[in-house]
Amino acid sequence: MAHRRLRTFNTRDTYPEQKLDNDLAQAVIAGKTIYLRGQVAQDLDSRENIGVGDPTAQAEAVMANIDLLLRECGSELGHICKVTIYLTDIRYREPVYRVAGRWLKGVFPVFTGLVVVALARPEWLVEIDIVAVIPD
């Protein structure tokens, strides 16, 4: 089975001020493994930023994007294996992890959390990267 790429886009449309030209996808399915692009608090269709300045609101938007993308791939939150959370401030850890924990209650994925200097846009406070599987 060849890789399937869902919601393809080019960075020149997403980040016009950065003069980039990269062909990317929101999700790649390789066999039964799903790799999601790091999700931020941005509407997947309109590219509108959500919850600017509010880590809790951003985490909710991110998890909603993850849920939507996994369903589009033929999976669901319960099939997440690996979560990597990037925060721009350690003080966001509790609110972001509370939101993620609520969405992933009973799933038991492995988690990695990192604090980084910045994300691709200054208004983004959290980014979550996911690896999941498609069930049999």
Image (cartoon, rainbow, N blue to C red):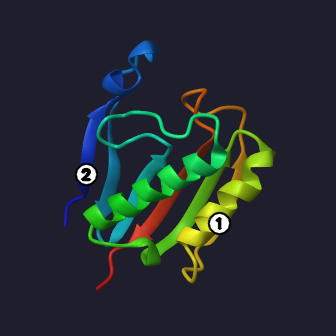
Decide: is 42 above or below 110. Answer: above
Give the percent coordinates (x, y) of residue 35.
41, 58
* Mark 2 surroundings within 10 Å by alpha-carbon count, few (fewer than 14), some (14 through 19), many (20 or more): some
Give the percent coordinates (x, y) of residue 125.
63, 39
Rounded to the nearest angstrom, the CA distance separating label 1 from label 2 is 24 Å
Where residue 111 is drawn, which disc sits there? 1
Quadrant that contains the C terminus: bottom left
Horizontally, residue 18 falls left or right of residue 125, namely left
Q: Residue at x 33, y 75 (%)?
A: 134
Q: Residue at x 55, y 73 (%)?
A: 104
Disc 1 marks a residue whose amino acid type is Phe
Disc 2 marks a residue whose amino acid type is Leu
- Residue farthest toward the left in the current orientation of the protein: 1
Residue that label 2 marks: 6
Q: Residue at x 58, y 74 (%)?
A: 109
Quadrant that contains the N terminus: bottom left
Horizontally, residue 4 falls left or right of residue 121, namely left
Give the percent coordinates (x, y) of residue 123.
59, 30
Give the percent coordinates (x, y) of residue 121.
55, 28
Front-most of residues 85 and 20: 85
Task: Using the rendered view, name the quadrant where residue 96 is placed.
Answer: bottom right
Task: Using the rendered view, name the quadrant where residue 124 is placed.
Answer: top right
Tell me the element at label 2: strand
Q: Residue at x 68, y 61 (%)?
A: 97
